Amino acid sequence: MTQATTLKEQARAPADQTQELTDGFHLVIDALKLNGLTTIYGVPGIPITDFGRMAQAAGIRVLSFRHEQNAGYAAAIAGFLTKKPGVCLTVSAPGFLNGLTALAHATTNCFPMILISGSSEREIVDLQQGDYEEMDQLAIAKPLCKAAFRVLHAADIGIGLARAIRAAVSGRPGGVYLDLPAKLFGQVMNADAGKKSLVKVIDAAPAQIPAPAAIKRALDVLKAAKRPLIILGKGAAYAQADEAIKTLVEKSGAPFLPMSMAKGLLPDTHPQCAGAARSTVLKDSDVVMMIGARLNWLLSHGKGKTWGEAPKTFIQIDIEPKEMDSNVEIAAPVVGDIGSCVTALIEGMGGNWPAAPADWTNAVKTKREENVAKMAPRLMNNNSPMDYHGALGALRTVIKERPDAILVNEGANTLDLARGVIDMYKPRKRLDVGTWGVMGIGMGQAIAAAVETGKPVLAVEGDSAFGFCGMEVETVCRYNLPVCIVVFNNGGIYRGTDVNSGGGSDPATTVFVKGSRYDKLIEAFGGVGVQAETPDELKRAVEAAMDSGKPTLINAVIDPAAGSESGRIGNLNPQSVLRKK
Ligand SMILES: Cc1ncc(C[n+]2csc(CCOP(=O)(O)OP(=O)(O)O)c2C)c(N)n1
Ligand SMILES: [Mg+2]
């Protein structure tokens, strides 16, 4: 008899009392383990409480969160960090919906993730007879993810999970929904047949080799460039083709611009890094090679003022053919996985590839040095209350001294300014709000980063951003994770100085309680809380936290007037001529 065979089940098993049995609970666990999925992020409840317990007993690491959205963000970023689908586990209807934002976020950001949700009885749900937590979850999930599956028979669990894994990681990765109705878990079947029904997914994300003609076309365009630019996106970071990408960039001699989560793929201090000369390189380049980056809003759709007058020719490397020409014409599309494409490009370049023209690379270098020099004194100020630059100057040094640490970052000013100020030195060390600029990813990402990598984590959080996920400090403390949270407390969204222009007693829509002490929150759960009022205090507190590995929350007091509306993207706020003075 297996552990799975409870007395009740034995009583139910009619024919052969000696046959070994298994059940849905154990088949899901065995299928996950068989495929190396050994961590689950979730929230327990009917119908998955026992499943979580059994998974933990079977050696799967099951991390329970306080809200499914944070568990979902943890699973999504685990997918980004590991190239294996991150697994989030939720209860039916409300739990499922709480996890769904993260699933959609994973899909938008091309992170492999599987949201496994328990669901209520199909017969009742489909007749809309008001079951416990009734909802047609499969139909709701479908438009928000890459694929959605439901398993009704225990014998199909193996195939169901195999389909989910392949859908999540092959081609362009994304979120997958797997619906497991309550009844499935208790279904019993012969243990041998159950074992045979499991599928170990072979080569889940097969290499996609680019066509030689596409490689030649791309290299012809690049060779003719007078002012080439390489843009690295988070797809390039995801690919884990770090050495090949470095070789390509260095061989080309072209300036490179890392998108937010591609920072550190090559160090921000690399002589070819054009991060500090972003507007110059976007405006003045003539050939732009995109590697795992999309011409979406973050790059002004590849046109308009940001891109200047100089005509552009685009080379784009992406695994998704439909990405090509999505916003502007792509002269040289290279479709394939990034590792294979970049390797083929390097081979095609041969031994005597001409370096990018020196007048261009020197012009970029000069601009970059100018901008870095302009910023330097602002980063060294020791003002109290702190401004963003003073506080970030301190954190920049902390990361410089600890390049292995993972930086999680969200907020508006807290995000945009930290991205510019804090240099990254290694791949996949910067995790943030991604394509949607979503608030609330911080704690989920910090927890998953610590769990998946074992490295210390520094989470730099706007006070509003932190509010979306702050209760997870209990989770950080419960699992005793090496996470240091710095809340940039400027008393509000963008600023803490707004007033209610209606004159009523309610505070303005964007401000919070003045002088609040977020550090007290973590003390409630046994973590270390620190109040920091100067950059020096902040630096000392972060260093102590990173050295001790103790869960720590530092309330960094930021001048409420220091921020600007919507950080760096205020231009996206709609304007009406009626309101213009
Ligand atoms: C889920 C979600 N809700 C709302 C927003 C809108 N939003 C953008 S930034 C932001 C908060 C910015 O304030 P804070 O985190 O305190 O950063 P600060 O600019 O004050 O440093 C909000 C609410 C969002 N991006 N995502
Ligand atoms: Mg704020």
Image: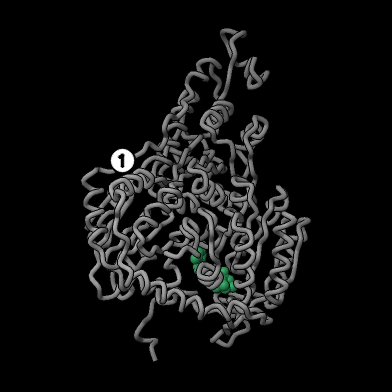
Q: Residue at x 39, y 41 (%)?
A: 147
Q: Residue furthest front?
A: 352
Q: Is residue 565 left or right of residue 206?
A: right
Q: Is residue 414 left or right of residue 57?
A: left
Query: Which residue is denoted by mark 1 in the rendering?
Result: 209
Q: Residues within 10 Å of mark 1 (few under 14, many from 20)?
A: some
**Nearer to me, 491 or 339:** 339
Q: Is residue 509 visible?
A: no
**Nearer to me, 418 or 300:** 418
Q: Secondary structure at mark 1?
A: loop
Q: Position of residue 474 (x, y in %)?
A: 70, 54
Q: Quadrant of ligand 2?
A: bottom right
Amino acid type of disc 1? Ile
Q: Position of residue 568 (x, y in %)?
A: 46, 74
Q: Position of residue 223 (x, y in %)?
A: 25, 58
Q: How many marks?
A: 1
**Nearer to me, 256 or 560:** 256
Scheme of image coloration: one colour
**Relative to 519, does residue 125 appear above or below in the rendering?**
above
**Relative to 465, does residue 89 appear above or below in the rendering?**
above
Q: From the image, which quarter does the C terminus lie in?
A: bottom left
Residue 127, picture quadrant: top left
Q: Position of residue 531 (x, y in %)?
A: 74, 71
Q: Residue at x 45, y 52 (%)?
A: 237
**Nearer to me, 117 or 468:** 468
Q: From the image, which quarter does the N terminus lie in?
A: top right
